[in-house]
Amino acid sequence: MTSIDYIVIALYFIFILALGPVYKTFSKTSSDYFRGGGTMLWWMVGSSAFVMNFSAWSFVGGASRAYETGTYFLVLYGANVAALIVSYFFVAARIRNMRIITAVEGVAKRFGKGNEQFFAWLPLPFFLLMGSVGLYVIATFMAAVFQMPTSVLIPIIGVTVTFMALSGGSWSVIASDFVQLLTVVVITIIMAFLALGHPKVGGVSGLLEKMPEHHLDWSLFAQPWVIAFFCITLIVNQTININSLQQGAARYVFVKNGRDAKKAVIVQIVGFVLITPFWMIPAIAATILHPDLGLEYPHLNNPSEAAYVAVALTVLPKGLMGLLVCGIFAATMSTMDSGLNRAAGIMVRNVYLPLINPQAGEDRQLLVGKFLTGLFGVVMIAVALFFSTLKSMPIFNLILLVAATVGLPSAVPLFYGIFVKRTPAWGAWSTSLVGIAFGLALNIALDEAALQRFFGTEQGLSSIELADLKLSIVTASLFILCTAWYFMATVFAREPTSEEKTRVDAFFEDMKRPVDHDVEHGPNSECDDRQLKVIGNICLIYGIAIGLFAVIPNSAAGHASFLFCGGTIAGIGLFIHWIRHRKQTDSNEGPSEG
């Protein structure tokens, strides 16, 4: 790392911290603070949703997996695309039509007040846990870059993210996610080309020739039946989680209507299809440039998690390493600040407002929301510090196991509840409790010895097979059990009271009734013009600032890289301003007479 890298990082942090105050005036109500008033531009929301999935974990835990297994890692992003296709056709528009501020308000409409409290408290540890994992991930990456302890980096990064989420609410979260996506995309593309251009790699043909054989032939590290079982259960897990009311699909309450919600899904699908191949190249190239990461990074719990940073330090020109750090930090922030914003929103709208202070006005709700955001930020930092003390759990398996053991049982009833009308209220909370209890017990019972005993051959199961098999068994078992329990509740449901029937009928009727944004939100909602102006200016300023680094003494690749990064982001800013100008022109001209 050079002094230029540190200057790039410092300027990026200043830029990110400034977004909170810039968007502070956008939040006049709790709806504004927690979901952008339901008026956000679809491409900003779609970008935020994508970058939440394409977080720094992709550059650390994901890169480790790609380093070890090559193209096998594509099954995860393939599962995400499959889940998003379900979102597009069946879920996204339904979620927006619910006319809710937080996902738990949708739970209350569908399953009643008891489930509102159950699902308000149940996901709180999950949101904070995933945010803490994200914080630990980016600290792990930066520890490899700066050769500093994660225990020092975690508080610094955590305070930065908490401040931004606290000051600007959902507006600054979504806007920063969009700008950060641009940073991630350009640096990922640059990394791919520079890695391929390294003499030891020798382009695409050289990469394919020199990469480990098992990167293309998966059967060399796992039996076909284990791979097939893993792929099927991963698709099930991602589909349920991404499309449940609580976990994944709640992001669509930010946009104006169901049509825009479906457009936001398309942004995510395009992102996975176009960006994933570029992202994988450096991680696979690391097997050629750095075949023994254990010797290079002995201080890391899992040295293969430094695959991306090792390649970056090898191929990036002066100043670009700092930009990569910014891009990876940007990707992680979306998971952390969105988790903080969602957790605070649920606590205010679904706990504080109905149970503690039903008369709380908008100012009081905003104040409590900001206090809780700060409090949850402190908790997130503390949990991430605990993760830094663990010695054996790889990040990839940690995230997927948590999602399967805790996330899946809570997501199943909130997925089926969008489609199945008859299930009683007790079917939702009981499905989650039974599933979580069973999942925890199953994780304890399924140790390596048990898996080897039941499924091992004479050669025994490899570490990859053991991890994938355990995750697959947990996922499949929980899905079958939770599905059976949920529909059992439907079979044994008593006749609903008139109040319950009215509530549930209204819930399903709302999902069928498209949102008329102009009528339902009125003239006081945030207009497109203001959003386009602010985000366009942000992209212009950020892009020009990056482009100016092209004048510093550097290699030809360094000059070209900074010009590409800065020019791309500034060019998108100009394009946004052009869209704004066109909208203004069309609005001034009005409908033509015919």
Image (cartoon, rainbow, N blue to C red):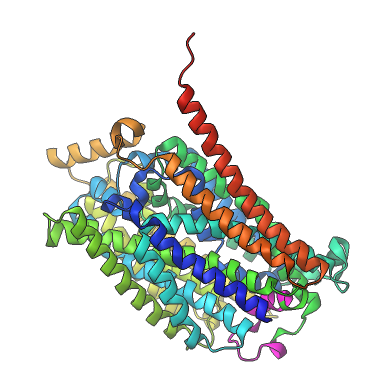
The quarter of the rendered structure image containing the N terminus is bottom right
The image shows a total of numbered marks equal to 0
Going 60% across and 43% down the picture, which residue do you hit?
575
Going 37% across and 68% down the picture, which residue do you hit?
126
Residue 589 in picture, x, y percent from top left = 48, 22
Horizontal side, residue 492 vs residue 467: left or right? left
Going 44% across and 50% down the picture, which residue do you hit?
243
| Dominant secondary-structure state across the stretch colored magenta | helix
Going 51% across and 65% down the picture, which residue do you hit?
15
Q: In which quarter of the image is residue 430?
A: bottom left
Q: Give the range drawn in magenta.
A: 294-312
Residue 462 in picture, x, y percent from top left = 66, 78
Residue 192 in picture, x, y percent from top left = 75, 63
Q: Nearer the viewer, residue 498 or 210?
A: 210
Above or below, 307 relative to 587: below
Above or below, 462 relative to 114: below
Q: Is residue 46 visible?
A: no
Q: Which of 566 and 513 is in front in this view?
A: 566
Q: Which of 50 and 550 is in front in this view?
A: 550
Query: Which residue is at the far top?
Result: 594
Q: Is residue 352 visible?
A: yes
Residue 525 in picture, x, y percent from top left = 33, 41
**Residue 4 lies in the magenta-colored region:** no
Above or below, 298 relative to 72: below
